[in-house]
Amino acid sequence: MRTGVVAVALALLVLAPLRSARAQFSFDARRYGMGGVSLSRDGNVRRYNPAYRAVKNKNHVAGTPKFSIPVPIGLVDFFKDHPINQLGHDPMFSPESSAFNPVALLDIVFNPPIFYEVKKAPMPTNDVSFTVGRNQLIIDLGASKVLIPEQEFGLGTTSRLLDLGVGFAGFHVGVMGFLQYDVGFTLDSTLRSFLVRDSTARPNTNYFANIDGTVQAGFAPTVSFASRVTRGAGGGETDDGLYLGGAVHYYMGATYGRGIGPAGFTTGPAPVLGSTPAPLLNGDLFTSNKPFGRGVGGDVGIVWITGPFEVGAGVNDIGAQLTWSHSKIQHFVYDNAGDSIASIVVSPDTSIKTKLPITYVGNAALHMGTGTTVGGDVVNSGRGTVIHVGVEQRTGPFAIRGGVSRDQRKKMQFGFGGGLRLGPIGLDVGFFTHSNSLSTQRAITMATAISIY
Amino acid sequence: MKALPAALLVFVAACGQGNVILNVDVLSFLTASDSTTQYNVIGGLPPVDSTISRRFLLPPGLGKSTVDSVSASFSSQLENLTGGGRVTLEVFFAKSQGGLFIGTPYLSDSSGHVTGVQTVPMGTNSLRLADSVFTTDSLWVGIRARITTDVGPNMSGQLRLTDLRLRVVLQDKIL
């Protein structure tokens, strides 16, 4: 079972770049080299701003390739350490193994091993000590204390994994795939104090983290319309003008799940270690019994292009509320008597409504001539604002790139890279820093791709 | 019982290549009567043993860990009042009560020969490597006082255990 899940996940990661459009998670080495910004009018920007569908000259930016094929060097390294035919027995994925490390596993989720990790984010390597006595239990995490988040720690985004369709006379009819997830962990103040302040555990006390995770995915038949409402000074031969666009989605959810509740442990009566602390789990699980959670939502977008400058803004998933008519609600609680997790079906078949968070996207680019292009974008998909600013300088067959960004955790990140074009084929390399790992320090990843012009 | 170690592990596993160290105040798990042994033994008899054994709990999840080293130490005070002889204090650890007092003790120290009113401090420490006894979240400690008397009046007094500690260093995580 685990092998299958891992294999499918890795296969999706490998195949994802072959899709006609990309989500915010990108495999574009050029983009990474510019701090995450996309300077081209590619599928990414059209998917989040329907007004871009009316901009005919999508490859206006000089040197923009038709598409890029990522070179997943990181996967080679990953499969060297974790042979694919032995994933079922791989200690990393087996909780029964002494080598199982959920932190490392979580690190892979946060930071998929597609590209080569030039510098791994160092984990704190200090010792962790427990002081154990009849009336005391103290944990000293040492330098690892910095990993204990003060506020909610979470990740989430809405991605549009698929965008297929045809267009005519300003209209576009197609199908969009969507994936939305949001996972948040909040340490209860008692647990945080116990872990950070070297205070002893108290008897008859709950120590827990509140967990709230949601994932929903499906596809949405879409009708959109975009048009150039005014022509700019450049006239009809150029892209100059003001563009407006809108799209209506009929969401057809394939699957949905949400888990919410505390997880931790409860100490017994004094002395605190007079009895084994009891696991604490008391949560609810909401799952869809059948696919096709249904709902309607829409996008709007605007683009203004004048000469070398363009700016756009889009708002997605407005009013997107899905109704899952056949859902199950279960309550999970840890049964100390049976030393097992007991589940109670609260409602075997009920209706649940979910929302897709509204995503805001803004972008701007300035083509300065002499091969220089600068640009930036701002994205907020429900978990903080991400900002990218980047620049590309092309000289003959060479290109150099650089950029900065602010990630969801409000940390500054940096990117640089270059490219070499030889006729219809080019090779691009981008280095970028990220804080996707459970570490206070940045990692550096090298993204590589072959571009087809 | 995997939930609790998993909950602890979320935080503890972040120590990367560092060690997990358990500093255990074993004495705190003993009652006052456990830590003080009164003796009054007829002189000239073969050695007499006085033993106590107690179970104590460690943080759950130690069963799959690898023990790098275990250091143990104790200190005590022999307060002899009458008679003469010697007292040897031995400390054992085992996963079960039945496993106590078998083989070589973890800690052992002798008072040497004492006679009449005399107070003698006792104590020692030891270091063992890769001892699988400590890969558990429930441990038994056994303390044996072996009293060997001289021919003559009864040997009486008390032996007070003033400190008993364990320091267990685990090579890897606790799950």
Image (tube, coloured by chain):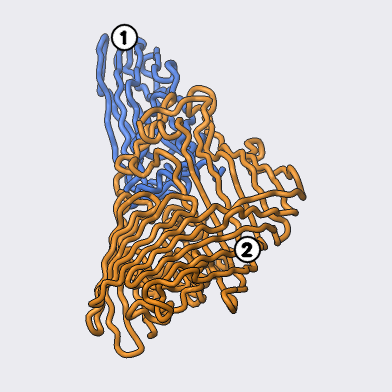
Q: Few, some or many C-alpha atoms within 10 Å of disc 2 (few <14, some 14-19, many ≥20)?
A: many
Amino acid under disc 2: His
Residue that numbered label 2 is attached to: A249
Residue B156 at x, y = what percent?
36, 11
Amino acid under disc 1: Thr
**Which of these two is toward me, B69 or A210?**
A210
User: Is residue A87 something one can see in this rendering?
Assistant: no
Query: The chain coloured blue carries which letter?
Result: B
Query: The chain coloured orange carries which letter?
Result: A
Q: Residue at x 40, y 78 (%)?
A: A238
| Residue A432 to residue A102: above or below | below
Farthest residue, direction right:
A349
Give the quadrant of residue A67.
bottom left
**Horizontal relation, residue A75 to residue A249: left or right:** left
- Helix, strand or loop under label 1: strand
Residue A37 is labelled as none
Chain of the residue where label 1 is placed in the rendered structure: B
| Residue B37 to residue A390: above or below | above
**Horizontal relation, residue A103 to residue A345: left or right:** left
Residue B82 is labelled as 1
**Which of these two is toward me, A47 or A268?**
A47
